[in-house]
Image (spheres, grey):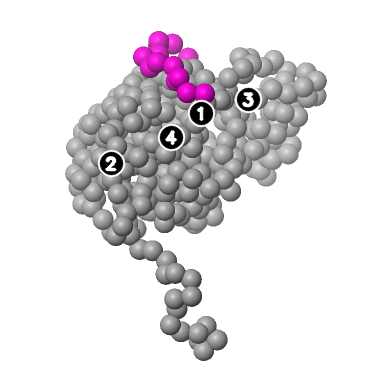
Amino acid sequence: MSHLQVVARHATRPWTRAFASESPSSFPPATSGVYKVFDRAAKRKQRDRAVSRDAGVGSRTVDYVRDEVADRMMERLLDIKRKFNTIVDLGSGPGHFSKLLEPEKTRKVLMIDSSKTTLNRDRDEEFEVEVERVHADEENLLDVLPRNSQEAIVSCLSLHWVNDLPGVLVQIKEALKPDGLFLGAMFGGDTLFELRTALQLAEVDREGGISPHISPMTDTKDISNLLSRAGFTLLTVDIDEVRVGYPSMWELLEDLRDMGESNAVVGRRHFLHRDTLAAASAIYKELHGNEDGSVPATFQIIYMIGWKPSPNQPKPLERGSAQTNLKDVL
């Protein structure tokens, strides 16, 4: 059994985990000049297969990271004293965040996801508010949402597979009404650093070079700049971690597969030699292993809040307009 420990923002809470990639793309290829880091078609297939395997049993078993992050996102939403008519859940998956919504906060949730199988994994009866599901590519949000049409858009751990993150943030801002809310969470650059270093060291030792096996992720210091460039205001960005303990690296790789989080970098190698993986497992335990023999995996989470500008929003006073001298106060 593995355990999940919540650190940093929350007190430690133990979690238990029971142990636990092809459908044709229906979306046209993007026509913009965006540099492609991720193979979006491969990612859809991975996620479809993860849900289809064993009638979704394995997929549900590994909901623990997304469920925990969704819970922390909900805490942030509840701090906002506003009721929304509709909330858009972008890259919703089966609805980790949407299932937490209550009628006191919104009447309806609109779930959008590029994986149709994942989108329809769970029944409407598991939600407390009205649910509408839209099968669409998150990278082309304005194809399904009119501009200036939404009160709130949330995204729980889906933006790390987007090729054009600045462009998607702009689309989110454009789809929002003035004074509309964007609340998001995405994996940060230090996610799975233990696995990354173990694989790199093993590959150099056994094969004389390295290739990408874990997707590149956004650095935390860039998020505020990206939100500001996209046109959001009243920004809030903070960082947290979710740490999970596994018996070994093999169980971690198994869970990442069942999460639909396998490697989807363009030009990736589709296999690793068994002896390289065995070496990586040994290095992982040697460098990062816990005293009880388990190994940790760190998921760094970046939380972000931004608002679409509106004339009635609070604004800072102009420089030099203060009526009290700071020297008199101090």
Mark sitting earlier along the chain (3/2) = 2
Q: Which mark is residue 168?
A: 4
Task: Name the amino acid type tagged 3.
Answer: His
Q: Distance between the residues labelled 3 and 1?
A: 17 Å
Task: Name the amino acid type tagged 2.
Answer: Asn
Mark nearest the camera among 3 and 1 is 1
Is 30 part of what is drawn in magenta? yes
Mark nearest the camera among 3 and 4 is 4
Q: Residue 125 carries which label?
A: none
Task: Name the amino acid type tagged 1.
Answer: Asn
Is 49 part of what is drawn in magenta? no
Residue 184 at x, y percent in the picture: 42, 44
- Which class describes the residues within 10 Å of circle 4: few (<14), some (14-19), or many (20+)? some
Q: Nearer the viewer, residue 32 or 224?
A: 32
Q: Residue 213 carries which label?
A: 3
Residue at screen point 56% across, 25% down = 35
Q: How far apart are marks 4 and 1 (CA)?
A: 9 Å
- Which class describes the residues within 10 Å of circle 2: few (<14), some (14-19), or many (20+)? some
Which stretch is magenta? Answer: 20-33
Q: Mark 1 points at which residue?
A: 163
Residue 93 at x, y percent in the picture: 37, 30
Mark sitting earlier along the chain (3/1) = 1
